[in-house]
Image: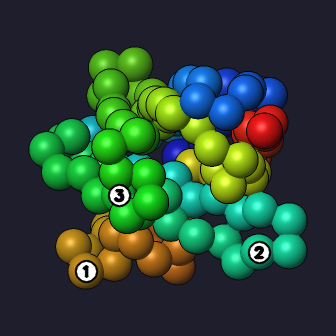
C-alpha cells in the first residue's frame, strides 16, 4: 500500500490553468496505476483521467480530452493532472487514487483503487 498526498488546488478564472500533484510514499511507485476522480456538490463522483504504472497508456473522460493531461514521474513518486482551458463545470474536489493491481477493463472504476488521497478543491469562476 501507498500513502497519497495531494496539492495544487485553488481558484482560477474560466480559461485558466492549474496543475494538481499527488505524491506517493511507502512503496515503489512504478507498478501503480494512478487515476484522478472528481466530485462536485450534489453530484456523483466521476472518473477524470488515469495513467498506467509505466506511463505508457492514458485514459480520459470525454469532456476533458484535449484540455487535461495526466502524467507520472516514478523517480519522484509523483503523479500530475495538468488542467488547461478550465471551465466552471470543472469545479469539484479532485482526488487521486492508486493501485498496483488494476486490470485494463477497470481503470475508470473507483472500486479498482485501494489507495486514495485526501482531495483538493478546484474552483473555476465565471
Q: Is residue 10 above or below residue 49?
A: above
- Residue 20, numbered circle: none
**Residue at x 73% of width, y 26% of height:** 12
Q: Is residue 47 visible?
A: yes
Q: Nearer the viewer, mark 1 or mark 2?
A: 2
Q: Residues within 10 Å of mark 2 (few under 14, many from 20)?
A: few
Q: x, y (%) of residue 38?
A: 64, 58
Nearer to the camera, 17 or 77: 17
Circle 3 SS class:
strand
How are the colours assigned in the image?
A: rainbow
The residue singled out by tag 1 in the image is 105
Q: Residues within 10 Å of mark 1 (few under 14, many from 20)?
A: few
**Residue at x 56% of width, y 24% of height:** 17
Q: Is residue 1 visible?
A: no
Q: Quadrant of residue 124?
A: top right
Left or right: where does residue 66 sit relative to residue 36?
A: left
Circle 2 SS class:
loop
Q: Nearer the viewer, mark 1 or mark 3?
A: 3
Q: Is residue 21 above or below residue 98?
A: above
- Residue 60, numbered circle: 3
First in sequence, mark 1 or 3: give its number. 3
Q: x, y (%) of residue 11?
A: 80, 28
- Residue 43, numbered circle: 2
**Residue at x 33% of width, y 25% of height:** 73
- Screen quadrant of the C terminus: top right
Q: x, y (%) of residue 75?
A: 31, 20
Q: Quadrant of residue 107?
A: bottom left
Alpha carbon distance from label 1 to label 2? 24 Å
Alpha carbon distance from label 1 to label 3? 14 Å
Amino acid at each position: 500500500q501507498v500513502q497519497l498526498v495531494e496539492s495544487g488546488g485553488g481558484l482560477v478564472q474560466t480559461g485558466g490553468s492549474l496543475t494538481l500533484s499527488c505524491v506517493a510514499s511507502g512503496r515503489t511507485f512504478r507498478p501503480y496505476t494512478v487515476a484522478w476522480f472528481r466530485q462536485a456538490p450534489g453530484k456523483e463522483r466521476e472518473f477524470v483521467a488515469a495513467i498506467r504504472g509505466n506511463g505508457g497508456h492514458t485514459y480520459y473522460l470525454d469532456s476533458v480530452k484535449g484540455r487535461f493531461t495526466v502524467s507520472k514521474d516514478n523517480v519522484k513518486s509523483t503523479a500530475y493532472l495538468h488542467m488547461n482551458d478550465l471551465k466552471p463545470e470543472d469545479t469539484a474536489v479532485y482526488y487521486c487514487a492508486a493501485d498496483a493491481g488494476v486490470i485494463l477493463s477497470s481503470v475508470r472504476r473507483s472500486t479498482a483503487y485501494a489507495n486514495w488521497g485526501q482531495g483538493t478543491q478546484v474552483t473555476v469562476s465565471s
